[in-house]
Amino acid sequence: MSIIVTPSGQACGATVTGIDLSHPLNGEQVAEIRAAWLDHHVLAFPGQGISDDDLERFTLSFGGFGHDPFFDPIEGRKHIAAIRRDADETSPLFAENWHSDWSFQEHPPAGTCLRGITIPPMGGDTLFSNQHAALDVMPSDMREKLEGKVAIHSAQMAYAPDGAYGEKDEGRSMAIRPDESARETQLHPLIRAHAETGRLGLFSCMGYIIGFEGMSQLEALPLLQELYAWQSREEFIYRHKWEADMLVMWDNRSVLHCATGGYEGHDRLLHRTTIAASG
Ligand code: SIN
């Protein structure tokens, strides 16, 4: 039986039903899900009472595990991180700024999988922004300024000891481990072809992008801010509403994402894996 793919009606995203992820997927099912993923960039699988073993097996159906620095994995697993916030937590929200996961790596993960476990009764939506659409309709004067630019990526603002999740970040329930290695830099073209579809898009944004090759910080900063404002416009966004027992997979090569709050006084827990880049 084929999967049923229902588009969100927003800038990207679709819901997938007609499949049970608690069983191994056959080649045809993997090919169908991959095709839907490449079309819609974010797939939500509701009503999946799956375990961490199932999450790992699902992830491995689409590539190897990505390398996840700066987090301790959950106990007993090497490749699953907990995205967690306790009801009484007051530290700034994790991942509230737009980003593409680990874009500062030489080979950033193609995708991310997130399994909803404890979902608050309100708030906690994840936003996704379609970066093919953002490039497609970018005004030509802005595109001219960005065409051919090579972006400098780094995790320093988030994960260096003096970064947002560094030594001054207290009372966080997530197992974040800041490190000096966050200061390393990596270059990626800002506008690049998707490795599987060839479709052009904008890759990552200010935050993990800290500058442009051959451009002073004085020039780069306003350009990055202008770009960030464009990338996060409402028209490119899919707002994902979580349910417990829902698995979501997204394509880091096509979308930015960010977390939202609004669930003060409630726990939120999701288990996360990353899918390594192919090739
Ligand atoms: C993430 O960026 O991995 C977390 C997103 C969320 O908590 O909604």
Image (spheres, rainbow, N blue to C red):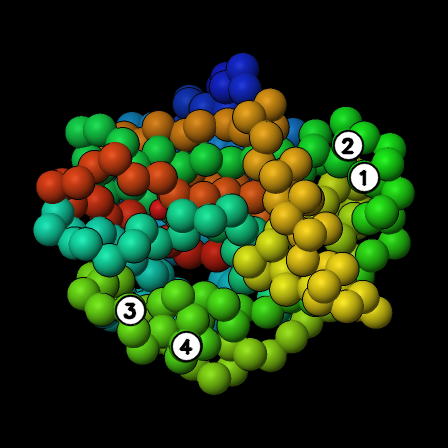
The residue identified by callout 4 is 162
Say whether disc 3 or disc 1 marks the residue closer to the N-terminus: 1
**What is the secondary structure assignment of the residue under circle 2?**
loop
Q: Amino acid at mark 4?
A: Asp
Q: Please give the label number shown on residue 142.
A: 1
Q: Residue at x 55, y 26 (%)?
A: 234
Dividing the image into 4 quarters, which one contains the C terminus? bottom right
What's the residue type where badge 3 is placed? Asp
Give the residue pinned by disc 3: 169
Task: State which tag comes first along the sequence, 4 or 3.
Answer: 4
Residue 67 disc label: none
Tag of residue 138: 2
Which is more foreground, mark 1 or mark 2?
1
Within 8 Å: ligand 1 and the Cβ of disc 3? no
Hey, which quadrant is residue 139 in on the image?
top right
Cβ–Cβ under 8 Å for marks 4 and 3: no
Q: Are marks 2 and 4 in contact (CB under 8 Å)?
A: no
Q: In this rendering, does residue 153 appear at all?
A: yes
Is there CB contact under 8 Å for labels 1 and 2? yes
3D distance between C-alphas at marks 1 and 2: 7 Å
Residue 259's x, y, as percent?
39, 43
Q: Marks 4 and 3, how far apart in space?
A: 9 Å
Q: Mark 2: which amino acid?
A: Met
Q: Position of residue 4 (x, y in %)?
A: 49, 19
Q: Is mark 2 within 8 Å of ligand 1?
A: no
Question: Mark 4 vs ligand 1: CB under 8 Å?
Answer: no
Q: Does dot 4 land on a helix, a strand or a loop?
A: loop
